[in-house]
Image: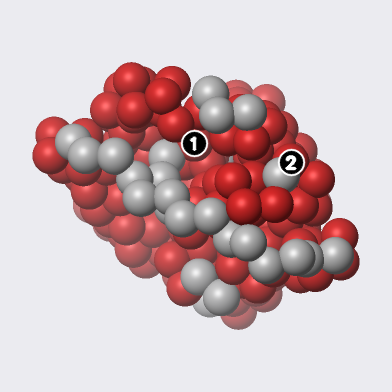
Amino acid sequence: MLQAYLTTLTAVALGQITPGPNLMAVAGAALGQGRRSAFFLTLGVATAILIWVTVAALGLATLLKLYPSLLTVMKFLGGGYLCFLAVKSVMAAWRGGDPSIQAHHAHWTPLGAWRRGLLVNLTNPKAALLWSAVATFLYGSGLSTSQVLGFAPIGFASAVLVYGIYGVLVSSGLAKRAYARFARGIEILFGGAFGAIGGKLVADAVREVTN
């Protein structure tokens, strides 16, 4: 379980560092309103992760009870999607270019900022695919439903740490310069991590079908 958690956490944390709706929303809040709004928006994003992991874990668990062989199909689908993300990330690193960050100057209350973060993450269809693939990897590693659910607070804590630090750095004007310097390396690391997980899922599925 620990190895599966560490592998997943590494990939998820790298994914959180790469440009995406969550990171851009936090950066926009930090630039336009400061670190306080960015922090509460981060909490909203992290709360959505709790929901995504819970839904993916329980939904997949229910389906696997009805159709045990579905796990092999999910390994093909989830592994293929993670490999797609890996290739996309490496191509983004190859092309280069800085992410466009736009400041959000609306005056959000803490609840409003939290709600904004929650909706940004929950309304992203790619998040559903990503967390379904993550749950598939954890189930494929032999974890039980309760153990897969146990990753939810880890994903929450990782989001708070990564986006929280990023919000502080953006609000102080440091993150843009630092990110421009290390963005390509981060994209490549993310691609490598998700490529490894996706490749393992597909390889396991092929082995299950051929045996």
Badge 2, how many Cα within 10 Å: few under 14, some, many 20+? many
Task: Identify the residue position indicated by label 1 in the image.
Answer: 17
Quadrant including the N terminus: top right
Residue type for callout 2: Arg
* Picture coordinates of residue 27, whole percent (x, y): 56, 46
* Left or right of residue 24, residue 144 in this image: right
* Left or right of residue 174, residue 107 in this image: right
Q: Nearer the viewer, residue 165 or 211?
A: 165
* Picture coordinates of residue 211, whole percent (x, y): 28, 49
**Residue 51 visible in the snapshot:** no
Q: Residue at x 75, y 65 (%)?
A: 107
Quadrant for residue 13, please give it.
Answer: top right
Q: Residue at x 59, y 67 (%)?
A: 120
* Left or right of residue 7, residue 163 in this image: right
Task: Identify the residue position indicated by label 2 in the image.
Answer: 35
* Left or right of residue 141, residue 163 in this image: right
The reply to whether callout 1 and callout 2 are in contact (CB within 8 Å) is no
Q: Give the SS element for disc 1.
A: helix
* Picture coordinates of residue 22, whole percent (x, y): 55, 54
Q: Residue at x 37, y 39 (%)?
A: 194
Q: Nearer the viewer, mark 1 or mark 2?
A: 2
Cα separation, mark 1 vs mark 2, equals: 17 Å
Q: Nearer the viewer, residue 206 or 151?
A: 151
Q: Nearer the viewer, residue 28 or 39?
A: 28
Q: Residue at x 30, y 50 (%)?
A: 85
Residue type for callout 1: Ile
Instruction: Indicate which disc, 1 or 2, sits on the residue closer to the N terminus.
Output: 1
Quadrant for residue 153, please give it.
Answer: top right
* Picture coordinates of residue 200, whole percent (x, y): 34, 38
Location of residue 1 with respect to 38 vertically, above or below = above
